[in-house]
Amino acid sequence: MPIDSLYPKSFASDNHAGTHPDVLAAMARANEGDAPAYGGDRWTREFEDHIKDVFGGAAAGFPVLNGAGANMVGLAGTVGRFDSIICPETAHIATHETGAAERLLGSKLVTVPTEDGKLVPDDIRTRLPVAGVDFEPLPRVVSISQVTELGTCYTPDEIAALADVAHANGMLLHVDGARLANAAAFLKCPLREFTTDAGVDVLSFGGTKNGALAAEAVIVLRPSLTAAIPFLRRQSLQLASKTRFISVQLSTLLTDDLWSRNATHANAMSHRLADGVTDLPGLTIRYPVESNAVFAALPKEAISILQEQFTFHVWDESENVVRWMTAFDTTPEHVDDFIAAIRKVLSP
């Protein structure tokens, strides 16, 4: 049986996608001969130069093994034992990282309910403790996701407003950037416009969801935080001995705007999907489609029928909300086949 029939195109996650051919080819070239370990190689130097080109001369990049690790290493450089982290209740660090922040950092997460996955300045102000009260953890970091877990994007001005409030109250701003490329593609602006220029202090930069095999990075934008990161990365088991194979993946994505082309295509496929089903009876698009995710509510029986043929996640069983994800290798034909199936199930 052909492998395509064993593994039809998934709409469950961009993590289900394969690796971009350019990334695989670059890894094969990096595989020729020996190279220094633990980041002492030329590919890691090239990656570090790319980070400065993209995020600014003061930026420092550190390749790591996975996204949760990138978040933990970045946050570890910002919080102390009695500090807390303010984040949306849907944040990945609060939901799908198995309590890593509490376990590994010892920091309390102060979660905030939101309409669309996005914090606003008052969400920070209303969660600041009374000065001098030592019965509550001290808020030290605001952590947001760009793209959010609901597929929405912060504008540069929205992020700058959060940074201003955080900094005015002695706090730092962290960004979970697992899908940072998709946000830049939607906003049609450079990566630094809503990170460096908006006042972000530290972020994770995702490659795996954007065509890499397995590659993430911690990006430090506040120089005073940089010195601790190499030690925290090693202590957190996020320093790969053969770092060159992570670095070359990220460098390839950052060369000739491959990251942007991949993200732009993935976003376009999600919009194609949403546009193709938005008029159907019984189906409601729950959140604005601003990235490569479509959240839709539809009848439970329709979900069951569709899942017999297609792979996707139910996001909220109580309200029959599903999440459909597209990726760099999702084709218009994939999307149109899915649309046709949805229309068949829901059309009167």
Image (cartoon, rainbow, N blue to C red):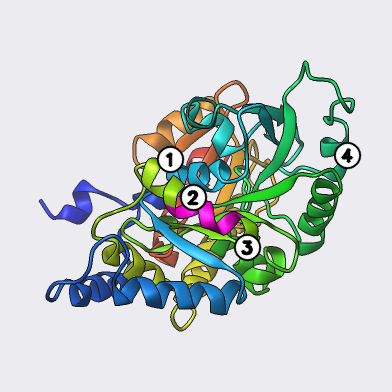
- Please indicate whether residue 345 sits to the left or right of residue 114 in the image: left
Closer to the chain start, of discs 1 and 3, is 3
- Majority secondary structure in the magenta region: helix
Mark 1–mark 4 CB contact (< 8 Å): no
Closer to the chain start, of discs 2 and 4, is 4
**Residue 185 visible:** yes
Please provide the residue range marked out in magenta.
Answer: 225-230
Closer to the chain start, of discs 3 and 2, is 3
Q: Which residue is drawn at 29% across and 60% down?
A: 38
Q: How far apart are marks 1 and 3 (CA)?
A: 41 Å
Give the structural element (helix, strand or loop) at label 4. helix
Mark 2–mark 1 CB contact (< 8 Å): yes
User: Residue 65: x, y in percent?
Assistant: 35, 51
Quarter that holds the C terminus:
top right
Dot 4 corresponds to which residue? 122
Q: Which of marks 1 and 4 is in front?
A: 4
Residue 325's label in the rendered image is 2
Going by the numbered disc 4, the residue's amino acid type is Asp
Going by the numbered disc 2, the residue's amino acid type is Met
Going by the numbered disc 3, the residue's amino acid type is Pro
Give the structural element (helix, strand or loop) at label 2. strand
Closer to the chain start, of discs 3 and 4, is 4
Q: In this view, does 278 lie above or below 76?
A: below
